[in-house]
Amino acid sequence: MTSIGATVKEPGSSINNKTGSWRTFKPILDKEKCIKCENCILFCPEGCINKDYDIDYDYCKGCGICAEECPVKAIKMERE
Amino acid sequence: MLKVISANRAIAEGVKLSRPQVVPVYPITPQTSISEYLAQFVADGDLNAEYIRVESEHSAISAAVGASGAGVRTFTATSSQGLALMHEILFVAAGMRTPIVMGNANRALSAPLSIWNDQQDSISQRDTGWMQFFAENAQEALDFVINAYKISENKEVLLPSMVCIDGFILTHTVEPVDIPSQDDVDKFLPAYQPTHAYLDPEEPMSLGTFTDPDYYMEARYAMEVAMQKSKKVIKDTYQEFEEVFGRQYGMIENYQCDDAEIILVAMGSICGTIKAVVDILRKKGEKVGLLKVIAYRPFPQEEIYDVVKNAQRIAVLDKNISFGIGGVLFNEIKAKMEVDASGFILGLGGRDVSPDDIVNIVKQTRNPTDTDKINWIGLKEEE
């Protein structure tokens, strides 16, 4: 139920809104090919790739920037 | 205490008695003296409020939304072009459910540029989610401000209110006004206690956020529910007001309508002229009445229908026009009830409306030539 005036009363609650559902293409990282350059971590606008190069599909919107920036083409974009 | 003052002064006195804590106002003719009186009250220490000299009306209403979101009672005032400039934020104020009260000095919109009265400015804001109350005189202007706070801040409502006074005809005309005592107003209108949207570090919340399609419609539906609920709140509030202050108001006023064959429907200062004409015509044996619409939003359709249903014909007088369809009040009444009505456009841009014009309207309503025709009153014939 929407609160009066659509106020948000729980701080940090935007995490409840899993934006991964917006995705059309899904980034798949081949960890064998990965050279751990950190480019994808730095360029991801959503902060969805952690230090272990795991992609958080709950919030990844599938923009494909990581795949574009990967120097060794270790990330493939696959249709959902 | 009885004082001889203008409606602008009456609005300012009503605001002072209501004790807002933040007053962001930008001056515009014919509202300017409201902003001046309030600045004087603050400077003299008669009103303990933060008076913000903003750089535009868009900023004035934005500051009012911010202040209301911070949890205090706020007031602003404007007119015409200023209200049009506020348009974007009027939706925000209503959507965020900030119970702001605003005084609007009704004035024509450009072009051509006019500083004189009609009601196009506030009528054009009808879909923003604000309640609108039209005053006939300075006394109503003062009383409606105090009532507007109580109605807007009611937990069932939480929508902003506009108190509309006809430019110059009311804003710059002096008349005797009974100014209530501060003690009585304090009892009637206690300090604003926000519970739904306010900033408090102990209880953090985000106001005016982005919503995706999962939430938006429910927020808008809640506004419609609140607008419908406001009708009972308005009646109860006026009832309570009458018990304390002795003056009786409703969503509408019925003046000599009970046995009337012809009923004129109008809003604002023109109702004073119509009452005088009704008295004259009644002396001549003509059964004529006036239905004054005070609350334009929420739209009092049941109350209007209850009064006009037994009349032979009604005339709806609009100081506004929606081009291509005619007067807005006329069309809303036609849309909501089965009545035999004629629509009249008059008084645009300060065109004088005389008692003879009203007599003419009664005649035209009795013997209509074409009921679909939009009748323009006081229009100069082409030479």
Image: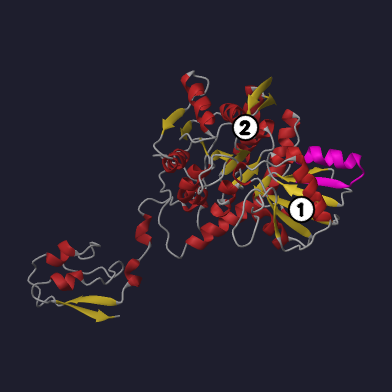
Q: Nearer the viewer, mark 1 or mark 2?
A: 1
How many numbered marks are there? 2
User: From the viewer's perspective, is residue B133 above or below residue B47?
Assistant: below
Depth check: give the residue in front, B18 or B118.
Answer: B118
> In x, y percent, where is residue B383?
64, 52
User: From the viewer's perspective, is residue B299 above or below residue B116?
Assistant: below
User: From the viewer's perspective, is residue B330 above or below residue B156?
Assistant: below
Task: Name the side, left or right, on which B176 lies relative to B120.
Answer: right
Q: Which residue is the site of mark 1?
A: B315
> In x, y percent, where is residue B254?
80, 44
Task: Tell me the kind of residue under disc 2.
Answer: Leu
**Which label sits on residue B159?**
none
| Local secondary structure at mark 1 | strand
Residue B127 lies in the magenta stretch: no
Task: Name the side, left or right, on which B272 lies relative to B282.
Answer: left
| Local secondary structure at mark 2 | loop
* Residue drawn at x 74%, y 33% as measured from the top left: B242
Which quadrant of the rendered structure holds the N terminus of chain B?
Answer: top right
Q: Quadrant of residue B273?
A: top right
* Residue drawn at x 41%, y 51% as measured from the top left: A10
Residue B286 lies in the magenta stretch: yes
> In x, y percent, where is residue A70?
12, 72
Q: Label 1 lies in what chain?
A: B
Q: Which residue is the site of mark 2?
A: B189
Q: Label 2 lies in what chain?
A: B
> In x, y percent, where is residue B332?
68, 58
Q: Look at the image and give the residue range highlighted in magenta.
A: B274-291
